[in-house]
Image (spheres, helix red, strand yellow):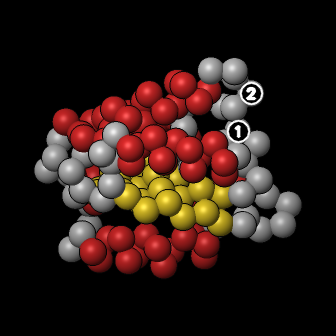
Amino acid sequence: RDWSSDVCSSDLQILQQLLDLSGRHPEARGVVNFVGGWMATACSTATTINQTLFKRGATFPQPTLWLYGDKDPYYPLSHSRSNFAAYQAAGGRGTFNDYQPPAGTSGHNISGTPSLWDAAVTSYLRERGL
């Protein structure tokens, strides 16, 4: 089945674009965020930039699923959790899940380890009737 018309999935720098697009297309049935972000925390304005963009997606009327990994060199869990809190404060709905990546890997690459998040994604998709 082609899920593209039902669920938007993100990786790295496209989450905000998907949330914004989803907010303008309420017929989308879900958004799954794999370690989404735009500006790494090495940038002094990362929090302002990322939270501004996440807030734009808060108009999406469906719950979203956010998946992040510990030990991410670009988006530490504390940063990602604060982005999610900003999203929720702006009216966004969703669930934030964090995972320990396998030894020797970065949390930024959890999309490559389905055993971490498969149950959460399967449940989310079932809740959406997918």
Foreground: 32 or 49?
Answer: 49
Q: Residue at x 42, y 36 (%)?
A: 54
Q: Residue at x 24, y 69 (%)?
A: 128
Give neighbour class at mark 2: few <14, some 14-19, many 20+ (Cα, 10 Å). Answer: few
Question: Which numbered tag is attached to residue 42?
Answer: 2
Is residue 130 visible in this depiction of the protein? no
Q: Position of residue 64 (x, y in %)?
A: 36, 56
Compared with residue 30, is residue 1 higher up or lower down, i.e. above or below? below
Q: Write down the residue under mark 1.
A: 74
Q: Position of residue 68 (x, y in %)?
A: 59, 56
Foreground: 6 or 128?
Answer: 128
Q: Quadrant of residue 104?
A: bottom right
**Image position of 91 (left or right of 101):** left
Three-letter code for the amino acid on which mark 1 is drawn: Tyr
Q: Residue at x 72, y 57 (%)?
A: 70
Label 1 residue SS: loop
Q: Residue at x 54, y 70 (%)?
A: 117
Whole-angstrom CA distance, mark 1 to mark 2, is: 7 Å
